[in-house]
Structure formats: C-alpha cells, structure tokens
Amino acid sequence: MATLAKIQKKSRTRSPQAVVPPRWRMSESEATDESVWLKRRALMQGGLIAGVAGAAGVTAPFADGARAATEEDPSAHLHPAPRNEAYVLDRPLTTEEDATQYNNFYEFGSSKTIHEKAQKLYLRPWDIEITGLVKNPRTIGVDELFSQVSFEERLYRLRCVEAWAMALPWTGFPMRDLVALAEPLGSAKYVKMTTLEDPKVMRGQKAVWYPWPYIEGLTMDEAMNELAFMVTGLYGKPLPKQNGSPLRLVVPWKYGFKSIKSIVSFEFTEERPVSFWEEVQGKEYGFWANVNPVVPHPRWSQASERMIGSNERRDTLLFNGYGEEVAHLYAGLEDEFGDLLYR
Ligand code: MTE
C-alpha cells in the first residue's frame, strides 16, 4: 500500500524545476517579518529558490480510493507577485507561522490546529465550474483560469467573528476579473460559491450534523467591488492547503467566514444563496456579515479584537476599516435589513 510520504517523495523527484523570476519588491518594512522577507528576497535574487513550472504535481490514489495530496504546487511560478501599494496596513503583519497554524477550516475539523490534517488535500486536477446565469456555462481547469488573469499582492486585515484578527499579505487577482470571464447575464443578482466536497480527504465532512458542502455568497455589487479578492497565495508563496488552496475568496470588510476556501464552483443566481453558517445557525450568522463594533454576536462582543500572535487588543473598525471602499454598497439597505447587515 502506497503511503502518503512515499507518494510525496516520488512526486518531488519527478517534478521539473525552474527558477522563479525575481519580481519581488518590498516597499514596507513590517518589523515582525522583516528577517523572513529579506532572507527570501536574497535567496531569490541569487536565483536559489526553485519553483515548479506548469502542472507538475503527481496525483496517486490512496488505497481507500481518495486522491492523494501532491507535494509541489503548480502555481509556484506565479508567486510572489508585485505588491499593489494602494493597500496599506495600520498594524504589523501577522507572522507566517501564526497565519498558517491558526486556522478555521471545518472540512478538516473544528479545532484551530488542522494544518497537518489539511495536507491531505490534493492540488490537481482542480476544476472550477462556472454555472447558472452566465452566457456560457463551463468547467475550467484552475491553471487555465490562472493563465487568464493578472496577479498582485495586497496587504489586508482579516477579522473573524470570534473576535480575533490578523494582518496578511495575500496574492491573487480581483474577483471582478473572474466575474468578467464568467460573463453573467443581466438577471444575475448573486454569486454562490461552493467548496470541494470529498469526505475521504476532508475528514471533517464526516460530521453529518453540518450541511456540507461549505457555501458562501455575495451580491453582484459586492463581487465587483475593488476589494473582493480571489486568493491563490500567502506570504509570496502558493496558498497553503490549510488556508484554502488552490483558490479562495477574501472579502476583508466582512467577518472571516464569508472568505470561503478551496472553491470548486461559482454559480450566478437570481435568488440569494443560503450560506453554510447561516444554515447551521441563522440567528448567529447572516448573509451580510459586515464587520461592525456595535452589533454583538450572541457569544462574542464585537467592540474590540485580539491580534493573533501579539494578543494586542484593538478597537474594532466599522467595515473592518474599509468603509471608504464599501459603505456605499449598503446605503439604503439599512431600512430593509437593519442589524442583519452586520451579523
Ligand atoms: N472556508 C471553508 N470552506 N471552510 C471553513 O471552515 N472557515 C472560515 C473561512 N473560510 C472556513 C472557510 C472562517 S470562520 C475563517 S475566520 C476563515 O476562513 C479563516 O481563514 P484562515 O484559516 O486562512 O485564517
């Protein structure tokens, strides 16, 4: 029987190697991670970090029929991408270790320490379904999708409804570029996104009391907003599996549960989708989930947040500090939805 370690060793030895072009530029010094960044940049300028060109991962079956994890990430050559300087932080970056070892990914369990279990996730083949109210419903390989968009890095705050927060360097592309590729019809009002469902790999999906697969949704205006970001990388590298590889959403003005991981489908709909957590407990988690310090969750005051790593407490900012970019999306909706916009 092939073990995961054997399969990974095999795939390592088979993969062609290529040098990543030194596209990295670092304009800000974030004290927490400066040494890590500088070390990486020095290595890259010396041409010593090898990336993987093309779809190099080897996928092999487990004895139980589940597909195995692959070692190298075929999107390595796309990372790092140049930083978009328009997005600045008001706080130091969270360390890479904290960002990749303190996670919420219920498909692998309900604890924060699922990063090892998540290594069972495979990277390829990974198809994305574009369906519903679009000109041409189709299925597209994730690498084909990546070849049609431009990558950049953005520094964003991340705020979980559990009242903890991080500040992270994500790599990806604007969600509006994906919407443009999808060519939605005028009747589309929402985008419904779905995570992979494969309980043999995502063992947390054996918990039958949850309504798998994980689903999230945005209005078309939200999806087209400049801040909505499709993420493929973190800290200048391909997205770690525990953070939702190969493709996740990041919407920094909303609570973290809206930022759905490991997406396999985008469906354009006329009806508002019911998201995973809304179905689990609609009174606690709503569709809108915009960050607001004065609307408490039944179990967590939202007045302040704890930065992961430093444990520093900071006052929560309305829309997580992104009001200038997004407040207009909700003008006029307060009469209809009131506090529901913020839970
Ligand atoms: N996406 C899926 N598919 N499954 C999940 O359990 N958790 C959400 C969100 N996306 C989750 C998910 C929650 S609650 C948070 S706070 C963020 O992912 C955490 O992202 P991170 O682990 O990269 O920090």
Image (cartoon, rainbow, N blue to C red):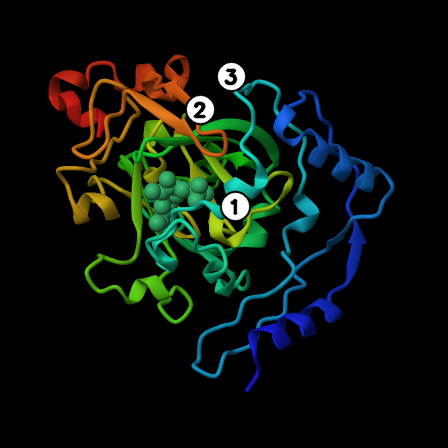
Instruction: Name the amino acid type tagged 3.
Output: Asp
Disc 1 + disc 3, Cβ < 8 Å? no
Snapshot quadrant of residue 294: top left
Snapshot quadrant of residue 334: top left
Q: Position of residue 29 (x, y in %)?
A: 67, 22
Kindly report which numbered mark, 2 or 1, lies closer to the viewer in this rendering: 2
Kindly report which numbered mark, 3 or 2, lies closer to the viewer in this rendering: 2
* Quadrant placement of the C terminus: top left
Instruction: Name the amino acid type tagged 1.
Output: Thr
Under circle 3, the secondary element is loop
Q: Earlier in the sequence, mark 1 or mark 3?
A: 3
Q: Residue furthest bottom?
A: 1
Q: Residue furthest front?
A: 311
Residue 317, compared with residue 12, is above or below; it is above
Q: Position of residue 27 (x, y in %)?
A: 70, 21
Q: Where's ligand 1: which quadrant?
A: top left
Distance between the Cα atoms at labels 3 and 2? 13 Å
Ligand 1: does it lie within 8 Å of the C-beta at label 2?
no
Residue 241, compared with residue 183, is above or below; it is below
Distance between the Cα atoms at labels 2 and 1? 19 Å
Crowding near pointer 1: few (<14 within 10 Å), some, many (20+)?
some
Answer with left or right where residue 269 lies relative to residue 8. left
Crowding near pointer 3: few (<14 within 10 Å), some, many (20+)?
few
Residue at which label 1 appears? 100
Disc 3 + disc 2, Cβ < 8 Å? no
Residue 325, compared with residue 175, is above or below; it is above
Under circle 2, the secondary element is loop
- Residue at x-position 46% and y-position 24%: 226
Residue at which label 2 appears? 312
Residue at which label 3 appears? 90
The answer to whether residue 137 of the structure is visible from this angle is yes
Answer with left or right where residue 169 lies relative to residue 200. right
